[in-house]
Structures are given as structure tokens and as C-alpha cells.
Image: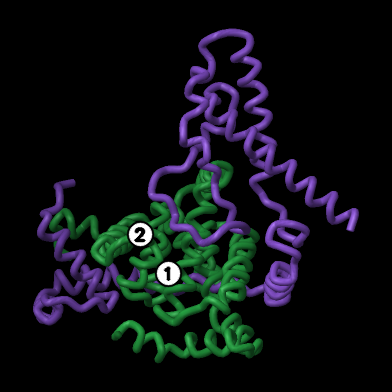
Chain colours: A purple, B green
Amino acid sequence: MSERDPRDERLDEALSALLDGEPNAATEALRARVARSPELRRRLDELARVDEMLRAVPEPAVPADLLARVRAQAEAEESGPRPGIGAPRPRRRWLVVGSALAAAAAGAALALYLGPGVGSAPETVRAPQVARVPESPGVGPLAPVPTTEPPGDHLVGLGDTSAEEILLVMELETLEDLEILELLEELES
Amino acid sequence: MEARARAQEDDDVRLMLAFRDGDVSAFDELFGRWTGRVLHYLERMVRDAACAEELAQEVFVRVHRARESYRPEAKFSTWLYTIATRLALNELRRPYRKRFHESRDDDTGGAAALLVTDEPGPDRVADARRLGRDVEAALAELPERQRSALWLAAVEGLSYAQVAESLDTTPKSVKALVHRARVALARTLAMPDGLRQAEEGEEE
């Protein structure tokens, strides 16, 4: 297959913007050209058909109790003593990840203890990136999504667990402890 | 200010302001107007109905929570999809979610299967379902930001400026994202007389 002419790419991009109703200085000229060119018309139709197919994907049914769940969660948060303490919240799924990481960290710590060659040097423990705990959708403000890649799949596993990651696990475990404390508080009240 | 004037015209903004002023039914109306679409978008983004539902719940909890501080500085839809997009992208970037998606991708068997919808046949309903699955699978193969940009522009009808706000980027980048996504989908779905023929300069 031959490489596409970059000009054709730009033209395609302009056709795509035309489909989205995004006007620009060349919109009218492009429309006129499409009207004259069967080739451009065909490309425009091909791109438009993608949109038709996307719009044909059936919309999921909204659960009948979703509004009630939203209200209950919102009201519980608003009437709670203070955010995060005692207020009912959905179980944070990162705790599950935390458990997996804890297992990974235990293995890695053992490997570090038994001999060199596994994990990172101790001094990397104090690296500032340690605080990069993935944000839970259920907590925290609406922060911009980081553009850098978050910790990847290598976090879960014994072979390449670094000292940084072990510290991350420790942080997660601390948070898990807080969850337990909150639960105890609720039971006592 | 032009953006502010536009926002004031937005009926959803009116509802949100009513909710801010204590009209609880305004929130219900907003929820009714938008939940299906938001859930649809989230399901396409995270490819997991239960997770999409959970995220949709969180989107509207945030809307509920924000009523007192709400200021009509943008279209309501831009604000709503910004919340949904950020939650979805955060969800997709969780390590265990990435693993889940990879395994799901393996299960789809690829999206290259072509469905020719204009072919006559007695099972058009089944064909439509299969089309939906093919499109969903093809969509899922796109990078997440392309997937988001294409869906918001092509299906939800957001302007590039609105999509740019949701994705924290520029309209120019959105234009490129949307276009790349469209071309990739057209290729993946192997449409009749598709773009590959155009690339090769073949005549019909």
C-alpha cells in the first residue's frame, strides 16, 4: 500500500471537521469542491457512515433505582459529620488493588532481604513520585487528569516491584487502616 | 461576555440554577435528561456496564454536590461531560482496569468482522445487534482520548471547543483526535469501498 499524500490527509481532516459542523475559512470552498468531486463525496460518505454506525449503538437502559441511589449518596455525604468520617461511601476499589499490591510488596521485600538484584536501591524510596496514588472516582476533588502515564501493570507482580512501589503499598495499607477505624467509629456510635 | 450569554440561554443551566435555589425537581429533570446519554458514553469508555453505572452515579452525585457553588460559566453539557470524561479516564488508568481491558480485548476476537447492513435478510434485528457489537469492539480498540473525542463530537454533538475543555486540550488537537478516530474506525470496520481503496487511488 502506498503512503498517503499529506495533502489528502489534511483534506480528510477538513472533511471530518465539516461533518462535525466546525466552520472554518475554507468551509464554503470545501463544500463547493465536494459538490464537484465524486471522490471527495465518497470519502465524506465513508466518514459519515462511521458516525451513523456509532449513533446506531443502542443506548443502555438506566437502572430504575439510579436516581434514588444518587440522592441517597449525595444526601448522606451532605448530612455526614464531616467528609470522609462516618459518612456511608461506596467501597473503594483500590483497597482490593491494595491487597494485591501488599502481596506483591511482601514478596519483593522478602526478595530484597534475601539477596541483591531484586527491586531498587533503598535510596529511591524517598523519590517524590511515591505520592502518585491513583485517584478514586469516589473521593477527592475534580482534579485534571494527569497527562503523564500513571503507574502501570508492573505494579502488580513480584518480579519487578520497586522500593517506590513498596512505599505506595504501605500508603495504601495506611488508608485501609483508616477505613477500619472509620468502621469501628460507626459501630460504636 | 459571549460565553456567559450563551450559557444563560442553556435550558440545562436554568434547571441547574433552579436546583441551586432549592428546586429539587429541577435536579430530577436534569437527571432524566442526561443520565441515559452519560451512561451510554461511560459504557463506551470503560466497556463495563456495572462500572459505567457506578461512574454515572458519581457524576450526578458531583452535580448534586456542586449546586451551591455552581456558576453558569459554560454550557451545562460541557461541564457534565468534563466530569464524566475525567472519571472515565481516571478509571481506565487504574492498573487493574488496564489489565481487565486487555483481557476483554482478547475476548472480542477482533473487530475486523464486517457487517454489510444493506444486505437483505430475515435477521435484521440480529444483524443490528451484531453491528452494535462490531462497532463497540472497534471503538474499544481506539486510544481512550480518540474514543472520547469521537463519541462526544460525532454522537453527542459537542463542538470541538467543548470537547477540548472536557479533555483539557485544544480544539485543534480535538480536530486531529476526532479525525484519526474516524479514519481508524472506517478502516477497522472494513467498510465497502473504504478508505484503503482511496489511499491506493483505486477507482470505484
Image disc number at residue A54 = 1
Quarter of image, res A20: bottom left
In the image, residue A98 sits, relative to residue B145, either above or below, namely above
Q: Amino acid at mark 2?
A: Leu
Residue B133 showing in the rendered view: no
Q: Amino acid at mark 1?
A: Leu
Q: Residue at 56% of width from left, 74% of height from top?
A: B66
Q: Residue furthest right?
A: A188
Left or right placement of residue B138 versus residue A183 in this view: left
**Pointers 1 and 2 in contact (CB under 8 A)?**
yes
Which is nearer the eye, B189 or A138?
A138
Q: Which residue is mark 2?
A: B185
Chain under numbered label 1: A
Quarter of image, res A5: bottom left
Q: Quadrant of the C terminus of chain B?
A: bottom left
**Badge 1 local density, few (<14 within 10 Å), some, or many (20+)?**
many
Image coordinates for residue B191, horizontal then vertical, percent: 33, 62
* Circle 2 SS class: helix
Whole-angstrom CA distance, mark 1 to mark 2, is: 10 Å
Residue A89 showing in the rendered view: yes
Chain under numbered label 2: B
Which is nearer the eye, B59 or B156?
B59
Image coordinates for residue A143, horizontal then vertical, percent: 48, 58
Q: Residue at 46% of width from left, 80% of height from top?
A: B71
Q: Residue furthest front?
A: A81
In the image, residue B1 sits, relative to residue B193, either above or below, namely below
Q: Residue furthest top?
A: A115
Image coordinates for residue B33, horizontal then vertical, percent: 55, 83
Left or right placement of residue B186 versus residue B90 in this view: left
Q: Residue at 57% of width from left, 83% of height from top?
A: B30
Q: Residue at 68% of width from left, 43% of height from top?
A: A175
